[in-house]
Image: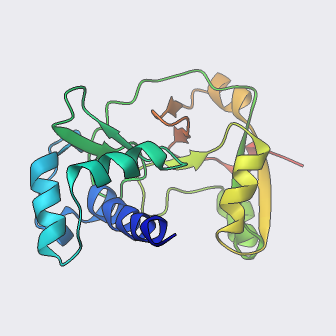
Amino acid sequence: MEQRNSDVKLGRFLSLVLRHDPGAAGITLDEHGWADVNELLAGVNRTGRRIDLPTLERIVRENNKRRYAFSEDHTKIRANQGHSIPVDVELREEKPPRYLYHGTATRFLPAIQGEGIRRMGRQYVHLSGDFETAMAVGKRHGIPVVITIDAAAMARDGVTFYRSENGVWLCEHVPARYFLT
């Protein structure tokens, strides 16, 4: 249990460093969001946290959201999506399924219904391919609600979709006219 708690805390810090603030560990990311693994390990350890390569590999392997990816030779690591800093994670455009889902909290519904789903501080809006995942996301923010989106109509209307390495669907904005009731 102690290892699990430690891994969760380290995972949250890795998320901060690899998605939002690499300077928190005193490192830099390249233009594609990759960090040198040895520099990351040294940087995390300089903050007073304790991490080694086997721990990092375990966190990446066991993360239920598959949030991180190693390069083929395990010398680099990056977050798969969710960046608030400008990086190009080399997403490939992909045709979405007919419906996608967005989990949020009920307190955000008035703004979402008026403005659509916006990126907020991220590079893309995050959408789920299934209702259950969207519900789990919504629960993290309060009383959950899931918005069903007519992704096929958005694609027909020229909206570009991407699918990240861990299966999250991404686009720049979801106008409210594509919400299904």
Judging from the image, the colouring scheme is rainbow
In this rendering, is residue 101 above or below 8? above
Picture coordinates of residue 167, whole percent (x, y): 55, 35
Out of 85 and 76, give the one closest to the viewer.
Answer: 76
Q: How many marks?
A: 0
User: Is residue 160 toward the left or the right of residue 6 in the image?
Assistant: right
Q: Residue furthest right?
A: 181
Query: Who's the residue at 17% across and 76% down the image?
Result: 47
In this rendering, is residue 136 above or below 26? above
Query: Who's the residue at 13% across and 64% down the image?
Result: 43
Out of 134 and 72, give the one closest to the viewer.
Answer: 72
Quarter of the image where one finds residue 151: top right
Query: Who's the residue at 90% across and 49% down the image?
Result: 181
Query: Who's the residue at 42% across and 24% down the image?
Result: 92
Does residue 23 appear in the picture of this structure? Answer: no
Does residue 94 appear in the picture of this structure? Answer: yes
Quarter of the image where one finds residue 84: bottom left
In this rendering, is residue 165 above or below 145? above
Picture coordinates of residue 31, whole percent (x, y): 17, 41
Picture coordinates of residue 11, whole percent (x, y): 39, 61
Quarter of the image where one finds residue 49: bottom left
Picture coordinates of residue 13, whole percent (x, y): 33, 67
